[in-house]
Structures are given as C-alpha cells and as structure tokens.
Amino acid sequence: MTLFAPEVTSIPIFGNTQGLKASQIRQLERLCRRSLPPERLITQEFARHLTALTHETGRQVGVLVDRRGDVTHVMVGDARGIEMPDWGRIRAGRGRLRGFRCILSHVGDEPLTRDNVTDLAALRLDAMVAIGTDADGLPANAYVAALRPENRDGSGIEHLDPAPPARIDFDFRDWIRAREEELARQDQTRSVGDGERAILVSVTTGRKPLDLESQLAELRELARSAGVDVVDMVTQHRPALDRKFLMGSGRLQDLVIRAFQFDVDLVIFDQNLTATQARNLSERLELRVIDRTQLILDIFAQHARTRDGKLQVELAQHKYLLPRLAQRSDVALSRLAGGIGGRGPGETKLEVDRRRVRDRVARLERELRKLRGQRESRRKRRSRREVPTLSIVGYTNAGKSTLLRALTKTDVHVADKMFATLDPTSRRLRFPKEREVVITDTVGFIRDLPPDLVSAFRATLEELDDADLLLHVVDAASEDYERRIEAVREVLREIGLGDTPELLVFNQIDRLPDNVGETIAARHDGVAISAVTRAGLAELIARAETLLFEEGGPGARTLGLAGQRH
Ligand SMILES: Nc1nc2c(ncn2[C@@H]2O[C@H](COP(=O)(O)OP(=O)(O)OP(=O)(O)O)[C@@H](O)[C@H]2O)c(=O)[nH]1
Ligand SMILES: [Mg+2]
C-alpha cells in the first residue's frame, strides 16, 4: 500500500525522512508552497511553521528561500544538525551572493552553530537564520548571520542581535542591496590583472618542522611564478593528517570562511592530497583545490616551449590526474582538472573517460620515445666529436640561465620565476686556451620533486648523462641554501648522477655583504660569482678548465693531454 500520492512524493525533501509520520512528511511538503513577503527576511508566522514541525519531530527543519520570498528547498535534519542540498545543482545568482537564504529551526533556543556559519560562507547565502523552538513549539529567538567583506576585525561574518522573528522587520531588499554593493566595492579594489587569488594551506605533523617558514615562502614563490596572487595563508600542526580532509574540522571551517572573505578562486595545499582529500575539500570549500605538485605541473605547462617539453608536461598532468578520475564526482572533478587559469589539461579533455586518457598517455609516451631517439643520436654525434660537456644544474631560480648567458654572451631566457627554464639549451663555449666545450642549461630542481615530474622529465634530464662536470649553481643569498644544495644532490642521486664530478658555484654574491659569498664558497670548496655583475667568472672558468682538462678530466683524455697529469 502506498502512503503518499505520487505527485506529492515528487516534491524533493532533502535529508532523511525515515521515521517520520506520513502527516509530518505532508507538513514538510507543504513548506515548499509557502513564501515570505519579499521585503521581509523572516516573519513570525513563517517561523511558526518551522518550529511547530521541529517541536513535533524533534528534528531541525530548514528551507532555502530565494529573493522573491519563495521556498525552493526543504531540508530535514536530526536534533543537532541539518545538511544542505547538493549545491552543485542549484544555479548561482550573478553577484557574489547566491540569492538564497537559509532559515532553519533549532531544537531548543540554540544560537547558530559553527556548521551553520560555515554553510553560510561556503554556499554564499544571503543570510543564515536559526530560529529557536520554545517548550510549546513556538518561535523563541531568531539568530541571524550574514556575510560581509573582509573587514578590520577579520571575522567576515556579521551577527545580528538575537530577537524574536516578529521584531526582525527591517526591509530585507534594502538590506541585501547594501550588502551586495559593499561586496562589489571590495571587488573593485581587488588588485588588477588576471591573477587568480589563492589561499595557501600547510598542514604539518610530527615534530614541528623547523623550516615551515621557508617551506611556505617557497610555496608562495611557486604560486607567484604561476601568476597567482596569494591573499592569505592557513597553517595547522596536528598529531596526524586527517584522512578525509587533511586538516581538522575547526581549521577547515575557518578556511571556508576566509575563502569567502578574501574572495579567492582557489586553495593551494603544500602537502600532496589524495584523490579523496582533494575531492572532499573541493566539495566542502566549493572551490578549486590543488596541491603543490599540481601547482608545479601548472608552472611547467605555462613555461614549456618546445614540443618535447609540452608533451612531457601533458604526460605528467595526465598521469597525475588519472587516479583522480577513478571515482569521479562531476563538480569536484572539473574543479580538480581546471589548473590555474584553466591551463590544466582542460575540463573537456578530462571529461572523456579514463580509457581515452590512457590512450592519450600511451600515444604521448610513444611520441616522446621517438623524440628521445632523435635526441640520443644527436648526442652521440656530439660525443663522437669528443667535446667535453659542462652541465649547469641547481635549485630553481638560482641563476642557471643567467650564468649560461653570462658565459656564452647569448640570449637565453632569464626570469625571476621558478621553473623559467624547462627545455634544455646547449651552447658552445670556448675556453681561454681555445678549447671548446658544450655547456647546457636545464630545468631547475626543487625539494620533494614530485615523482610524476621526475619520470616525465627523465628524457630532458638524460641530457645530463653526458655531463663531464656539473656546475651546481647555488643562490648564495637564499637563507636555506644548504638545504637546497642537499635537495639538488638528492635529485641527482635519484636520476643516477650522484657520481658525476660537481663544482659548487655560489651565485648572486652581489646580493650579500662583501666577502660573505667568498667565505661561503671557501667553506664548500666552491667558487663565488655573480652572474649579473660577472664577478668571479674568470675564476669559475679557470676552475672548470682545470677540472675538465687537467687532473685527469675528460678533456685531458680525449685531447691527448694525459701527459700533463701530475
Ligand atoms: N642580483 C642577482 N640576481 C641574479 C643573479 N643571477 C640571477 N639572478 C636573477 O635571478 C632570477 C633567476 O634567474 P634565472 O637565470 O632565470 O634562474 P634559473 O636558475 O635559470 O631559474 P629556473 O630556470 O627558473 O630554474 C632572475 O631574476 C635573475 O635576474 C645574480 O648573480 N645576482
Ligand atoms: Mg633557467
């Protein structure tokens, strides 16, 4: 026997109606047809319908109301909470607010909960109204919160004084208009340019990391290199990472509110996110969420110039996203796939099924193999001519390309951006004694280089296999240069170059007080230079020449100078 008429059951009620009586369900359904006068945020009568139901069922009852005053959604929760409908399907209004308010009744005369406030911010509601239910099932106080732009006290949330619904009689239309104007004014004062705005998040565990600051500074640098404006940073230290959200729920709620306040386009995590975490976070934040690996991939995508480079980046992007396609959730997925400024592999491409992505991966791999073959024969030709090779390696943004430019006086792309160089460049360089060498500049390294990137760039990095000497460029003015040296050496070991002779080149000494660079260099048996002022270049060339052509270097062998060895 069916209890309800079919046309009645087709009215959507969000939440679990199990355990409710048929008459109570009918009352819930009736809420759908109710409305408020457009000039009122809430009325006593409207509130009474909600509290009566809460009183009867012992559960929270809520509605979404649009700007015309019509109820568009009805929700039922439990005694303590209520869930909002799947927002992905509700069309957003044009302004910064969505044009809906949520009105719900609490069991007892309870103020707004943290969850209520989070929903307000995450869903960009016009207002969140909680009505307390008194012992007789009548409305007690109405607790109202609304969003406002970033303000001095930093809360971003305005709470009205609690008052019975009947006393909340200001003109809602004027009120909401003023609020939207205020938000629009804030938008106008946003920094110009096409930069997207982001909040950076770092969640750490275990012993408090000593280098949290430099790690965050680096993430900020990466974001800047990707053309993103960093407007806020959120950090949390906790005993263990949360499996579902990485961070704890309290901090996550803060993040939701701050994301609204600063009107950000995306949130960037310093830690790598699992597919599940990325999806959960992006659903909760209603925003695009990416991690450091994706950010780096994005910079790579922006900076790749050659065919080889572009194919490698695309391959790495697909490989990174493939596992994330496994349990697709449409809304979250398109957010995950977006990349910065939509420069990821692209939503449309990723909406094709996994098999097609895998096909593409196979094709990219085939093509890259072919290019690699060509490169290999080019390299073989070169080594047959037995010209020693010097390879410039080092942390990203250390000044590798600037050094190549200074040494060869050619025009090489230099930029104050991380990963400005992606594609290897080779130049010929004549040493003072008319000895010729090939010098190559490559992609920079970074700590915790994502494995997807290492494997994708294996081909480019193969260029380094021929190196007779590595010029390991270090930005001597960077505070954690020692840790960076280690990070570079670790990548070198990973790609099998741990044993290639290395000369540490401490660059950018012009940014340090006199003699500081020289002292650092002496301590590490390196050379101190400034690729910009050209200080120390002569010494660098002399040292490289000695290492290559004397002391049993490759030049000594091939040029028949072995006899000069001591
Ligand atoms: N003051 C000063 N700035 C330098 C020096 N060498 C490089 N720079 C600056 O540092 C920034 C990075 O230089 P690049 O040569 O592009 O660095 P890179 O190591 O090739 O960087 P990626 O290719 O991004 O890994 C640029 O803004 C350079 O002008 C130097 O000796 N002194
Ligand atoms: Mg470079």
Image (cartoon, rainbow, N blue to C red):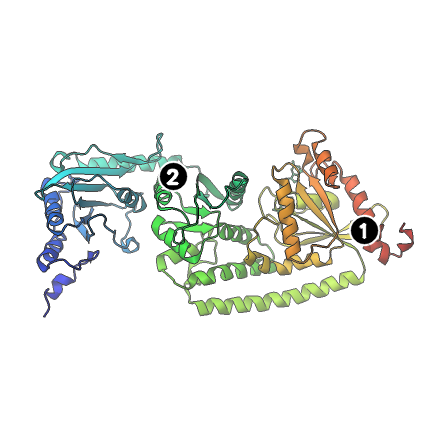
Mark 1 Cα within 10 Å, few/some/many (few <14, many 20+)? Answer: many
Q: How would you rate the neighbour count of disc 2 (Cα within 10 Å): few for under 14, some for 14-19, many for 20 or more?
A: many
Q: Quadrant of the N terminus?
A: bottom left
- Residue 54 appears left or right of 150: left
Q: Is residue 187 above or below residue 428?
A: above
Of the numbered discs 1 and 2, the one sitting upstream in the chain is 2
Tell me where residue 96 sits by quadrant: top left
Please state which amino acid type lies under the numbered disc 2: Phe
For marks 1 and 2, give the one nearer the viewer: 1
Locate residue 414, reporting x and y percent.
63, 44
Residue 521 is marked as: none
Which residue is at a point 15% across and 35% down the rendered structure image? 168
Numbered label attached to residue 548: 1
Q: Hey, which quadrant is residue 329 in on the image? A: bottom left
Q: Residue at the location (46% across, 69% down)?
A: 356
Mark 2 highlights which residue?
Answer: 262
Front-lying residue, 152 or 112 = 112
